[in-house]
Image (tube, helix red, strand yellow):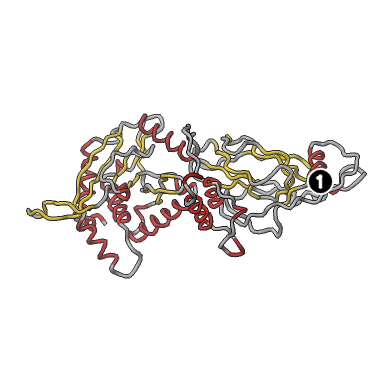
Amino acid sequence: MPVVREFKLPDLGEGLTGAEVVRWMVEVGEVIAVDQPVVEVETAKAVVEVPCPYGGVVTARYGEEGEEIAVGAPLVTVAVAAAEGSAGAVGSEGPVAPVAEAVERPLVGYGVAEPDRGGRRRRVGVAAAAAPAAAAAAVAVAAPVAPAAPAAPVVVPVISPLVRRLAREQGVDLTALTGSGPDGLIMRADVERAVAAKVAAPAAAVPVPQEGVVPLRGLRKAVAEKLSRSHREIPAATCWVDADATELMALRRQLNATPGPKVSVLALLARICTVALARFPELNSSVTEDGSGIIRHSAVHLGFAAQGERGLVVPVVRDAQSLTTEQLGEELGRLTASARDGSLALAELTGGTFTLNNYGVFGVDGSTPILNHPEAAMLGVGRIVAKPWVHEGELAVREVTQLSFTFDHRVCDGGTAGGFLRFVADCVEHPGVLLRQL
């Protein structure tokens, strides 16, 4: 006789208390396999698929799309066979369709697709689902139940949840698309072409958007809460200085003229930050939750601002102080690419001790950034642009940038912050200074 198992929303990452239902991947009455993803949820860190550790018939699911589910709250209930073959018959009047793969296994990693098990997900027809549901509720079935043929679902050849989400957000019907990928697989480019075709439609056919309130959810809500907390709790101060980056840019051109991976400006700035933090370690720290002490971090876990599909995120380069400049560039490039396609793991978005914010890519010169709580400092870098500059006593056109430094005034005074920023500026203007520290 089947047993009903309740699967609750697990803890999806450090500090996360809940997740928003983005899309259900199973229906009530559907037969699922062990570790099959049942729902796609959005946390404050990422969009992930949540697999269920039970195999059997889905008897209930909790939460509508857009609804917030707390960690530990029920997600689905599954009718699981008590023992292999025990679901073969109920009562004495007729057989009941067995529950496929009704075995319990430990939960696998979130969002990781399992290999193809040789068949598609099956949904039990209304008549066939009635017997397992009744058995799960421990109600004897006396009358014969004729199993109905499963309804043939509409199969949409698309694998990526990001492609599905893009289609959903842009109002694109995936069943109407012909995929350009292998075996007709629908790719992101196919959805983008459909979106472009909609935009090219006559303006009269486009409805006028109505005024309304956009709810804060998922990543945007988490960012709002974190920035509000930072602004409320941290007595932050900002100082800034203009720096001549001409020699730094010349060094980059020299490095990239030699064989090997290309070195980005961000990688050079990251190297400068790790050296500066070794000189001023009090800035690689955070204040304890109760405000009674300061935690000095032995490693530099360097966060950097990156623009992704879901908005601004801060990926973290672990142990940045131990990487070469080339390795820093490769890791920054990898994390930036993952941020753009929305594939960053939760571990890659947490645990930072210092943040580098290159807002110059947006064409702006300066900023007074809010600290990434609970970090104690952030270096901001404006655009590098040709400006008139006094160089060696003469007016010249130089490549100039503005550096701004925001810090938690509880961990140091202005002298330390000013010393850090001046050292960074000196390294930008005279990259050879770095050799003394390496």
Q: Residue 60: where, in percent of width, then height?
A: 70, 38
**Residue 299, can we see it?**
no
Secondary structure state at the residue bearing disc 1: helix
Q: Which residue is mark 1?
A: 128
* Quadrant location of the C terminus in the rendered image: bottom left
Residue placed at 69% from the left, 46% from the top?
Answer: 54
Residue placed at 79% from the left, 43% from the top?
Answer: 126
Determine the residue located farthest toward the right in the rendered image. 93
Within the image, what quadrant is residue 118 found in? bottom right
Q: Name the side, left or right, on which 172 lies relative to 231.
A: right
* Quadrant location of the N terminus in the rendered image: top right
Within the image, what quadrant is residue 142 found in? top right
**Residue 34, can we see it?**
yes
Q: Residue 250: where, in percent of width, then height?
A: 22, 61
The residue lying toward the viewer, choosing from 311 and 243, is: 311
Q: Name the side, left or right, on which 400 lies relative to 150.
A: left
21 w.r.t. 333: above or below: above
15 w.r.t. 438: above or below: above
Q: Name the side, left or right, on which 208 lies relative to 79.
A: left
Residue placed at 59% from the left, 56% from the top?
Answer: 177
Q: Amino acid at mark 1?
A: Ala
